[in-house]
Image: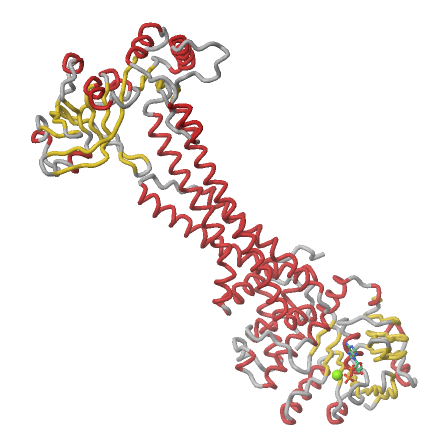
Amino acid sequence: MASIPSFSLLWESFRLAAGSLRSNKLRTLLTLLGIIVGVTAVIAVVTIINGLDSTVADAFSAQGSTAFSVSKRPLVITSREDFIKFNKRKDVTESDAAAIDRLCDSCWRVGTAINGSSLVKFGDSRAENVSVRGLSLEMFAIENVTIQSGRLWTEQEGNSGRNVCVIGTDLIENLFEGRSPSRILGQEIRVDGVPYTVLAIAEPFGKVLGFSRDNFVYIPFESGQRMFGARDSITVHVQVIDSNVFETAKDEVRMIMRNRRKKTFADKDDGFSVESQDAFIGIYQNATSGIYFATIGVAVISLVVGGIVVMNIMLVSVTERTKEIGLRKAVGARQTDILLQFLIESVTVTMVGGAIGVFTGYGLAYLLSFVMGFPLLISASSALLGVTVSFIVGIASGSYPAWRASKLSPIDAMRNE
Amino acid sequence: MESTESNGNGISHPYNSLIKMRGIWKTYQMGNEQLHALREVSFDVRRGEYLAIIGPSGSGKSTLMNLIGCLDTPTKGEYWINGEQVAKMSDDELARIRNKEIGFVFQTFNLLARATALHNVELPLIYAGIGSGERHDRAVDALSSVELGDRITHRPNELSGGQRQRVAIARALVNQPSILLADEPTGALDTHTSAEIMNLFEKLHADGNTIIVVTHEAEVAERAHRIITIRDGEIEKDEKIK
Ligand SMILES: Nc1ncnc2c1ncn2[C@@H]1O[C@H](COP(=O)(O)OP(=O)(O)O)[C@@H](O)[C@H]1O
Ligand SMILES: [Mg+2]
């Protein structure tokens, strides 16, 4: 028996669907809107987060998880209570760094850093909010800073706290109006009012998520202490030679630091924070999963709303075409034929919406990737997801109207005026 | 073989009947009252007959026609078409009967407004599951047989009333049904066009089609070979006139 719908019938249904979409454009647009918004949201966010993930992975894997830091406060503080608690901790000092260097067997490099930001001037030009870091020479190795032109300060220059610096490439533009390196090296800039001689320009790190990582002035650690020391605790950076001793090294450092702070097992707080990039990746993943869930929420709501709109429009369509349904039944359409016709119509509507949504989603992702500077990673799976979701919405919202249409008796339907 | 024609209520030998109705009732429940649109209707139609059903407005002609065409089901009674018991049929089987055994022509044409003449005529073939090539050829043939071979791409609003009814007739005939049913086919047409349509019916009958026409116009009824008169839902008269 011909209970399997023929291709002709499917094509007929599809033609009908296309016809009724074309015949009422405004209604079609309104019908599509919810689906478009929902699918756009899904596609845009999946694409954007794919792009972000790859940027973040790139940025962090450059250093790998072989380095961690010891500081008074963690990088991210989420509550006022925590802030007060962390502020009560003892400062991390140079002698802590020296102890770690001496006592930690698994540690390879130990460097010290003191971080701040300030106004930097050269003649009349000024750059605000420049990251100013006092670094020990080890830090250049730990953080993989390479010199593009000029030279790094010597150990002796460092130890004696000379007013010398290495600048990031952003300052070439922001401070020196793009002049050539040879005309920058040896110049004197003012950092927080204090004159510093530019010894070198560092190789650029590039941007992460639109934020430049090359807007800095690095000065010797001793000079940094002079600039910020009275105000802040330092950070000790540790690098291990191989990532498989990473956890061991962290434990050793924790023990050393706890001993130095006379902490017993009973003390819950270490009195310092040990952090590695895993922590940043954790923070990043938290943030992106938040975005993911918010978007899924938006998408689900707009798809449900869109589905309800499609269902209503389909009910209107069934009512408007009652006579046509009757006629089709009178010439031999079975219930399943009518059911299929209206299901195909609603699926066509939602799939068209979904297809538009896929494109606007990619468009949005493209715009954002352009503005924020991450790669556009278009994945076929997200397009498939969009299309599948709109198919399901089409079936879900078309079922009831299609069922109603299929149950109409031919004679009642045709009598309808 | 033809001898049974003559008996008074038109009941012929059952095995020759294309249509056999026995004790058919159609009752509508109107609030507390029952309205019997058909009462105890029995008759037979043989292959190749040209039958007219006449009667005043509201007498139950359309109700009867819809039952014959399997568009509706009787409240009581038995109905065989081509030897098959209709009352016991599932919805899908009824759809198949409507598709294969019956060609229905309506007073108001009932064409799909947005579809071409060709597509309108193709409709029953689509539901019969016939592939596009054969479907196209058969629809063109059917349109040619009603002299619309040169109008296949026209839409209903580009055709005259008579042309529209001829498209509807082509649609009714395209799947080679056992019976052509027409409920007031000339009701919406002027005299001249009506005559044209009736000539067409005569030709179709001559070609061997079984035809049942409902009408209240004497000129239309006179073209048939047998006339059933109904009044208040009952068969009043059943006479062979040719
Ligand atoms: N769906 C219906 N509900 C109630 N009464 C109906 C319905 N269809 C027809 N009737 C009634 O049945 C009777 C016969 O109607 P119909 O068969 O249309 O008459 P005709 O076609 O001979 O003018 C009329 O009284 C009509 O009002
Ligand atoms: Mg009538």
Quadrant of residue A49 in the image? Answer: top left
For the rendered model, the colour scheme is secondary structure
Quadrant of residue B45 in the image? Answer: bottom right
What residue lies at 75% left-to-right and 76% top-to-bottom? B179
Quadrant location, the N terminus of chain A = bottom right
Q: Quarter of the picture for ligand 1?
A: bottom right
Q: Position of residue A262 (x, y in %)?
A: 41, 9
Residue B199 in the image: above or below residue A403: below
What residue lies at 33% left-to-right and 39% top-to-bottom? A374
Quadrant location, the C terminus of chain A = bottom right
The residue nearer to you, when weighing A319 against A269, is A269
The residue nearer to you, when weighing B31 against B91, is B31
Q: Position of residue B48 (x, y in %)?
A: 78, 79
> Which residue is situated farthest in the right direction here?
B7
The residue nearer to you, when weighing A416 against B160, is A416
What residue lies at 66% left-to-right and 90% top-to-bottom? B194
On screen, residue A368 versus residue A134, left or right, reads right
On screen, residue B156 versus residue A288, left or right, reads right
Quadrant of residue A400 in the image? Answer: bottom right
Residue B122 in the image: above or below residue B234: above
